[in-house]
């Protein structure tokens, strides 16, 4: 893949306590290597990561959800983790933020259980997506076409199933984000 330049591109990474650490860190590093600025956003100032069943690191959030404005970002990243996905989907501020990103036609990169926020926000109908397999009924019941693939791109949505998919997820996320940047500049 050609080198992607995302300097000046702002990405909101929405998380809550108990997010899957590798699903934030891997994509965040790929984005930052391409020059993007990634801001961690949560409802509280510091969140605890998980490494599957074990506690991971603690992360300071750059903004809280009540401070964050979708208009200040070019894209959204939704890492997974069961507890994270279930917590985020219940937060009205997270749903509002996700709706504003999608309604502005900005790209979304979602992995594993991160899709629960999109489902609860009413944003997946008519989309083709993948996720951790246990979410397939939720996606289908919300009107999405769920498939079991490493990475799926549907217009400006990029989705993947699990940590093993991160290399493919990162590749497609960078491509879709770069395409979005070019379209915004045109």
Image (cartoon, helix red, strand yellow):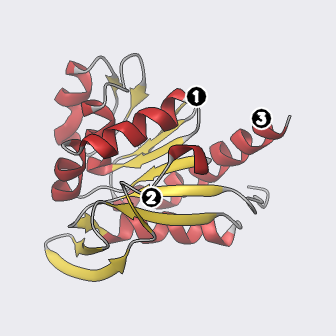
The relative height of residue 31 versus residue 174 in the rendered view (above or below) is below
Q: On screen, 129 above or below 185?
A: above
Quarter of the picture containing the N terminus is bottom right
On the image, numbered disc 2 is attached to which residue? 13
For the point 30% across and 50% down, the residue is 112
Nearer to us of marks 1 and 3 is 3
Callout 1–callout 2 Cβ contact below 8 Å: no
What secondary structure is found at the residue carrying circle 2?
Answer: strand
Residue 155 has which mark? 1
- Residue at 74 percent across and 60 percent down: it is 8
Residue highlighted by disc 3: 183
Decide if residue 133 is on the left or right side of residue 148.
left
Label 1 Cα neighbours within 10 Å, binned few <14 / some 14-19 / many ≥20? few
Residue placed at 32% from the left, 71% from the top? 21
Query: Where is residue 2, by image quadrant?
Result: bottom right
Give the structural element (helix, strand or loop) at label 3: helix
Distance, label 1 to label 3, CA atoms, is 13 Å
Report the residue at 27% width, 67% height from top: 44
Q: Nearer the viewer, residue 149 or 110?
A: 110
Residue 165 appears in view:
yes
Q: At which x and y percent is residue 79?
A: 36, 56
Q: Position of residue 175 (x, y in %)?
A: 67, 47
How many angstroms separate mark 3 from mark 2 (CA)?
22 Å
User: Disc 1 or 3, which lies upstream in sequence?
Assistant: 1
Splitting the image into 4 quarters, where does residue 32 fall?
Answer: bottom right
- Which of the image's four quarters has the C terminus? top right
43 lies above or below 102 = below
Q: Residues within 10 Å of mark 2 (few under 14, many from 20)?
A: many
Alpha carbons under labels 1 and 2: distance apart: 20 Å
Residue 37 or residue 82, whichever sits in front:
37
Rendered image quadrant of residue 106: top right
């Amino acid at each position: 893949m050609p080198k992607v330049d995302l300097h000046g591109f702002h990405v909101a990474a929405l998380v809550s306590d108990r997010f899957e650490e590798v699903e934030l860190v891997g994509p965040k590093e790929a984005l930052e290597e391409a020059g993007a600025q990634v801001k961690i956003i949560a409802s509280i100032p510091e969140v605890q990561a998980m490494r599957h069943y074990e506690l991971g690191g603690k992360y300071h959030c750059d903004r809280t959800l009540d401070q964050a404005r979708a208009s200040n970002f070019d894209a959204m990243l939704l890492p997974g983790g069961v507890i994270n996905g279930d917590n985020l989907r219940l937060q009205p501020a997270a749903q509002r933020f996700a709706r504003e990103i999608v309604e502005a036609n900005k790209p979304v990169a979602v992995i594993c259980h991160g899709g629960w926020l999109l489902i609860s926000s009413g944003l997946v109908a008519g989309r083709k997506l993948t996720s951790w397999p246990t979410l397939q009924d939720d996606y289908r019941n919300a009107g999405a076409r769920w498939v079991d693939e490493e990475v799926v791109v549907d217009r400006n949505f990029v989705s993947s199933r699990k940590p093993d998919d991160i290399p493919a997820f990162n590749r497609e996320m960078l491509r879709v984000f770069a395409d979005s940047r070019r379209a915004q500049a045109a």
